[in-house]
Amino acid sequence: MAPCINITEIIDKEEGIRHKLNEQERKKLQHEFKVHMEKYFKQKLGKGVDYTKIIIWDDMLVIRGEGFLTMPEKFINETPSGREVVRAARMQVVKQHSLLDNIPYFEERLKARAIHEAYELEPENDFWMHAIVFDRVLCE
């Protein structure tokens, strides 16, 4: 059995030196972020996501989810104009939650500053993605 790792201690272990995550640390943090995002959506939006995948790679964090639409949104999504309404509403939610809650959380946990981000939302496929680029390489 592998020893328990405290990611915060590893990242903060030397003054001014930011530790790059090894494979085990990266996988553990990806799982932590997945659980965080699933709880976050359930708490804030009242509905969880059916599938979430988190990837930490180089200087990036990619979050992808499927199955996030509510039943009313699925109904509205049946027409092209309805898809645009759902897309606009969900993009507003994504940007608001990213700015207020998620980016600060990820910056704190990774000890890195987010410098770019991009969103993709496909209501017709019940799919979304959020990519964040940080100011340093995160992994070995």
Image (cartoon, helix red, strand yellow):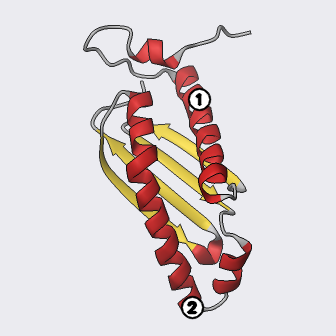
Q: Name which residue type carries label 2.
A: Pro
Q: Residue at x 62, y 91 (%)?
A: 79
Q: Where is residue 125 in the image (x, y as percent from the top left)?
A: 64, 73
Q: Where is residue 85 in the image (x, y as percent from the top left)?
A: 52, 83
Taking the image as shown, residue 58 lies to the left or right of residue 115, namely right
User: The N terminus appears in which quarter of the rendering?
Assistant: top right
Q: Name which residue type carries label 1.
A: Lys
Placement of 90 over or under 15, stated as above or below: below
Q: Where is residue 38 in the image (x, y as percent from the top left)?
A: 65, 47
Mark 1 secondary-structure assignment? helix
Q: Nearer the viewer, mark 1 or mark 2?
A: 2
Q: Which residue is drawn at 64% across and 50% down?
A: 43
- Tell me the tag on residue 80: 2
Q: Residue at x 60, y 39 (%)?
A: 36
User: The C terminus appears in which quarter of the rendering?
Assistant: top left
In depth, the one of 45 and 54 nearer the eye is 45
Q: Residues within 10 Å of mark 2 (few under 14, many from 20)?
A: few
- Tell me the tag on residue 79: none
Placement of 39 over or under 46, stated as above or below: above
- Asked if disc 1 and disc 2 are in contact, CB closer than 8 Å, the reply is no
Q: Mark 1 points at which residue?
A: 27
Mark 2 secondary-structure assignment? helix
In depth, the one of 53 and 93 nearer the eye is 93
Placement of 15 over or under 45, stated as above or below: above
Q: Residues within 10 Å of mark 1 (few under 14, many from 20)?
A: some
